[in-house]
Image (cartoon, rainbow, N blue to C red):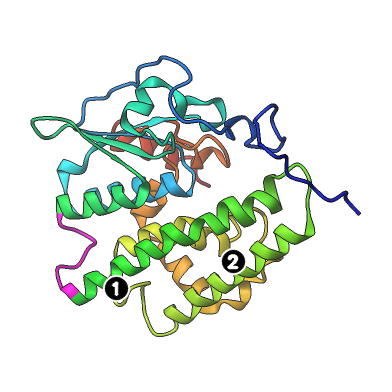
Amino acid sequence: MNAQYTPPKVWKHEEENGGTWASINRPVSGATHQAELPKGKHPLQLYSMGTPNGQKVTIMLEELLAAGVEQAEYDAHMIQIGEGDQFSSGFVDINPNSKIPALVDNSGSTPTRVFESGAILLYLAKKFGHFLSEDPSEQSEQLNWLFWLQGSAPYLGGGFGHFYAYAPEKFEYPIDRFTMEVKRQLDLLDKQLANNTFIAGENYSIADIAIWPWYGELVRGNQYNAASFLDVDSYTNLQRWAEQISQRPAVQRGRIVNRTWGEAWEQLRDRHQAADIDQVLKLKP
């Protein structure tokens, strides 16, 4: 049995605590080094990494392009969070919270910065008039689930994912605690989808775009190698939805952007034009 942890009277960050993301776990904000961000030719400049939070935005942009919104063309630049790119002075200027993704929209008279993935989805939906209903009741339901995701995903990622997959040691209490919460969330989504084609009703929306990279990929076995542990096959409605979303061409395109792991056809470090994605997807068997 592990010795009981006794918190210090005053906590100080004296050394890394181990684990996959130990190097970015620090108690202060702000830039650690000076570095400018790259810039492409399109008005929309995305600085991100192909994690679930990053995938939300690239899927949204690819869905907009698929819907015929030419103004949604974008450059996507890789931010290697394991190497501390998010703590550069350039990145902190557009997101003082030093988290991916972050977007700069240069289409107006002055640049607009947008950070937090949910805020970016909402900004793009309102800017281009897609994937957010104009009907007040339907829009409210879509926003309910968008904000549900923003509040719930940290329990899956920073909670369950961290202690189950990334922590230097596995401890029973945090894993069990967050497993029960994740299973409650999966059960909630499964029940919501029992009577709805999509998360917020019969129309595909930013709610689906936000939730799928986290919970859709989890039940498809692409998150934390925990599918059997979580008994994901029991959530049949959620499985149906996850597979349905995965078949959308824009989802298949968006999920590989700013990604440097997985199969060769899943990896596109930077994206500057549609042909960049086309070339990578040609590698798919």
Does dot 1 land on a helix, a strand or a loop? helix
Q: Is residue 183 magenta?
A: no
Q: Give neighbour class at mark 1: few <14, some 14-19, many 20+ (Cα, 10 Å).
A: some
* Residue ID at (38%, 47%): 253
Question: Residue reaching furthest left?
Answer: 109
**Residue wearing tag 1:** 141
Q: Are marks 1 and 2 in contact (CB under 8 Å)?
A: no
Percent position (x, y) of residue 78?
Answer: 43, 30
Of residue 263 and residue 63, the one placed in the foreground of this image is 63
Residue 22: give x, y in percent of width and height.
65, 34
Q: Locate the N terminus by quadrant.
A: bottom right
Indicate the quadrant where residue 248 lies.
bottom left
Q: Quadrant of residue 12?
A: top right
* Horizontal side, residue 95 vs residue 151: left or right: left
Q: Is residue 250 above or below residue 43?
A: below
Residue 105's place in the image compared with 147, above or below, is above
Q: Between 192 and 136, which is closer to the camera in this rendering?
A: 136
User: Which residue in the structure is indicated by mark 2?
Assistant: 182
The Cα atoms of the two marked residues, 1 and 2, are separated by: 22 Å
86 relative to 106 in the view: left or right:
right
Q: Residue at x 66, y 36 (%)?
A: 11
Q: Amino acid at mark 1?
A: Glu
Give the vertical position of 47 relative to 251 (above or below): above
Q: Residue at x 54, y 78 (%)?
A: 236
Identified by mark 2, the residue type is Val
In the rendered image of this protein, does residue 228 appear above or below residue 58?
A: below
First in sequence, mark 1 or 2: give its number: 1
From which residue to which does the magenta span run? Answer: 129-136
Which x, y percent locates residue 186?
Answer: 54, 71
